[in-house]
Amino acid sequence: MKVLLVNGSPNVNGCTYTALSAVEEALQAQGIETELFHIGKKPISGCLACHSCLKTGKCVIDDIVNDFSQKVLQADGFIFGSPVHYASAAGMLSSFMDRLFYSNITTGAFAFKPAAAVVSARRAGTTATFDQINKYFTISNMPVVSSRYWNMVHGTNAEEVKQDVEGMQIMRILGNNMAWLLKSIEAGKAAGVPQPERERIIYTNFIR
């Protein structure tokens, strides 16, 4: 079993990384393989709404998004982490996730794989960002993993985040809960419990 942890901060070893590392450590202690993926500082385009991916299962912009999509196929769970920028997720992570999830609508690569959001902030905007990221999971047939409180840490740098003892505990519990759910899913498969059937998507709007 493998979990991909995505660092959506431009800072490779900052607050978001510190929170994700605590989750990763808990996962590894439970025997779960992990990979920490940093989206980096190179610009990431937003979705062009060309819909090519609905036919190919691949974004027409061939960059880090398509690279990560290949990793998705081999992963069993996901943690997406972001700093708070103006009470929302970091812009590049939003672009990354928009294209990543939309280009995988037809592939179903995320379906039934547990996921969680992790948010870091100096002070506020955490719950709005947490809600924003979770929406990607709830539109993709993904179980959402929780902790004992909302998955957030506070601090202006990595050292301050480590002093947020409640936040770091929340990260550890999140890792343990993710590991438990992954093992439960694996046990269910071994017992012959089938996944829910993926129905054909029905699209409607508010005028018909």
Image (spheres, helix red, strand yellow):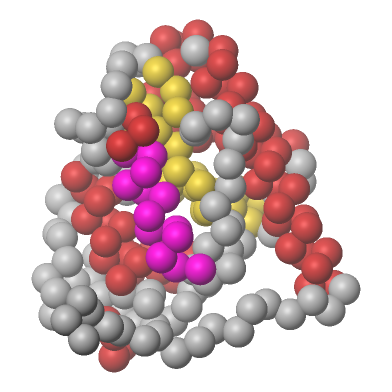
Q: Look at 58% across and 47% down and name the residue there.
A: 145
User: Which residue shows up at 25% across the image and 51% down it?
Assistant: 94
Position of the N terminus, as image quadrant, is bottom right
Residue 138 colored in magenta in the image: yes
Q: Quadrant of the C terminus?
A: bottom left
Where is residue 173, by image quadrant? top right
In x, y percent, where is residue 134? 41, 50
In the image, 36: left or right of 54? right
Q: Position of residue 120 (x, y in %)?
A: 38, 27
Q: Which residue appears at 36% of the width and 86% of the height?
A: 202
Residue 132: percent from left, percent from top:
32, 47
In the image, 62 versus 111, the foreground residue is 111
Q: Main secondary structure of the magenta part?
A: helix
Say if residue 16 shows up in the picture: no
Q: Check the image and report above or below for 61 versus 158.
A: below
Name above or below for residue 158 compared with residue 189.
above
157 over 120 or under it: above or below: above
Image spot of residue 176 (x, y percent): 70, 38
Rendered image quadrant of residue 47: bottom left
Q: Which residues are magenta?
A: 129-141
Residues 108 and 18: in front is: 108
